[in-house]
Image (cartoon, helix red, strand yellow):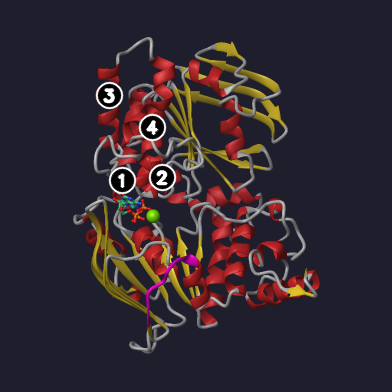
Amino acid sequence: MSDPRPVPLLALRGIGKSFLGVRVLDGVDLDVAPGEVHAVVGENGAGKSTLMKIISGVYVPDGGTIDFAGEPRAFRGPRDAQRAGIGMIHQEFTLLPERTVAENVHLGHEPVRRGLVDRRQMLHRTRQVLASIGESALPADARVGRLGVAQQQVVEIAKALALDARLLIMDEPTAALADHEVELLYGLVRRLQQQGIGLLYVSHRLTEVFDLSDRITVLKDGRRMTTVHTADTTADDLVRHMVGRELSSYYPDRAGPEDLGPVRLTVRGGGNRKLRDVDLELRAGEVLGVGGLQGSGRSALARAVFGAAPFTTGEVTLDGVPVRLRSPRAAMRAGVAYVTEDRKGEGIVARQSVLDNALLASRAAVAARSGRVARTARIRELLAAVRVRSAGDDQEIRFLSGGNQQKVVLARWLMLNPRILLFDEPTRGIDVGAKSAIHDLVRRLARDGAAVLMISSELPELLGMSDRILVMRDGRIAGELPAGATEKDVVALAVGSVEAVA
Ligand SMILES: Nc1ncnc2c1ncn2[C@@H]1O[C@H](COP(=O)(O)OP(=O)(O)OP(=O)(O)O)[C@@H](O)[C@H]1O
Ligand SMILES: [Mg+2]
């Protein structure tokens, strides 16, 4: 920011919050100026989402003050905060897929004329809002269910703007976006900024934080560690404030020739509605990376191997034996595990304990083979290895932060001791400290004989972790790259042209 002290749009002082006697926010101060992008970072469970929910009226703080647009406020609920001009973009989209863009944008505050919803006015206003953020190309009368994730997010933002939001809160807005969609969001954030809208931006992706923000606040264990101008800080500094120590930026060693075991999985001529001519081979001890744009068939590949959307043509072998995995159940029984990218949607039982959630898959699968005590001991090890932070194993999982819930799901799958592990975006939404722990764990599993297939949109992770990389495009494998390939190599194969990258 050029002017160091413009009148803040939002000023928090001494915000505190406890849940059931546990203090999760303690004396937090935070200012956001009009037109400022203020990033909030910190480990899973640091209190970021709780703070955002206080600002947007979801939670009432136990202490402290909130000034918005120069006035002290005490929001009685999200609608109250919305009316004041605070919009929150929820990651779990609140849109109705069967309704149009315009209907969603005006949901709950439809313009009415002579007692009827004024559709023309609704379309008109929606087009105005979309134009104001440079998104005129998005059809106001399209059904939301037909839109991609990035476009749905634009609708969420338009919805907030239609209510005249002056402050927008984005809590991990890119968690569901592919790389090229993130670019779109960047453009959008800049245009919002030019309109003088203040933005609070929560993200685990530090590149984004550096690309977008004017200032950064670091939370740790519910306390504000520091607030810095982005231009005056480095990623290393931030990480030190976040985790309280230095983190090595190295990935675990790749597999050497001695680490590679027998071929565990082969696919020949695999195809279905979303895939064609898939040939691949995966060996024990190996981490095979899968890159490509969203929609290129990466997840379809994992789902096909896992039997969730099976191959309809071609041949699959497991440990040399031809198999037909027609259901996830069959795949799990054959030793295949799939950690999907949608870990939140994937069967968390909100009112059950962390331990019961972690044991969910293995209870059925290995019940006959090992007793409760042994399983409990093993799952505790895994929960610690992925760094789940909770008040205890018997805490209900719904009280864990988003990132920590994801780690529990991860541990649940590892509990199956799979021979083949399919990971879809394994570290999305997971903090920097836990991320390297998970990288180490993935490599350890490979070294212990598992064959790992890992999809990642994060190029440094894909390049850092993989022994080989398959790049997908239009449902096919566009090419294979050896370890040591560059980001440019991956992108060139993913988009199918060298010029596009140069
Ligand atoms: N409704 C609740 N009841 C009890 N504890 C809660 C509740 N909501 C959050 N917590 C606790 O508050 C702490 C902060 O959680 P919060 O969701 O704010 O973390 P976060 O910084 O957003 O983490 P993440 O990066 O994983 O999203 C966590 O320890 C969490 O378990
Ligand atoms: Mg959160």
Query: Quick check: can you spot residue 500?
Result: no
**Which mark identifies residue 376?**
3
**Circle 4 Cα neighbour tier, 10 Å, few/some/many (<14 / 14–19 / ≥20):** many
Horizontal and vertical percent position of residue 181: 58, 58
How many numbered marks appear? Answer: 4
Query: For the N terminus, which image quadrant?
Result: bottom left
**Is disc 3 placed on a helix, strand or loop?**
helix
Residue 27, quarter of picture: bottom left
What's drawn in magenta, residue-wise?
72-78
Does residue 229 lie above or below 269 as drawn? below
> Where does the image place residue 358, in percent across and percent down from the top left?
36, 31
- The kind of residue on which mark 4 rests is Asn
Q: Residue 212's quadrant in the figure? A: bottom left
Residue occupying image coordinates x 54% and y 55%:
179
Badge 4 is on which residue?
Answer: 357
Q: Identify residue type, mark 1.
A: Ala
Whole-angstrom CA distance, mark 2 to mark 1, is 8 Å
Q: Nearer the viewer, mark 1 or mark 3?
A: 3
Residue at mark 4 to residue at mark 2: CA–CA distance:
19 Å
Q: Which mark identifies residue 389?
A: none
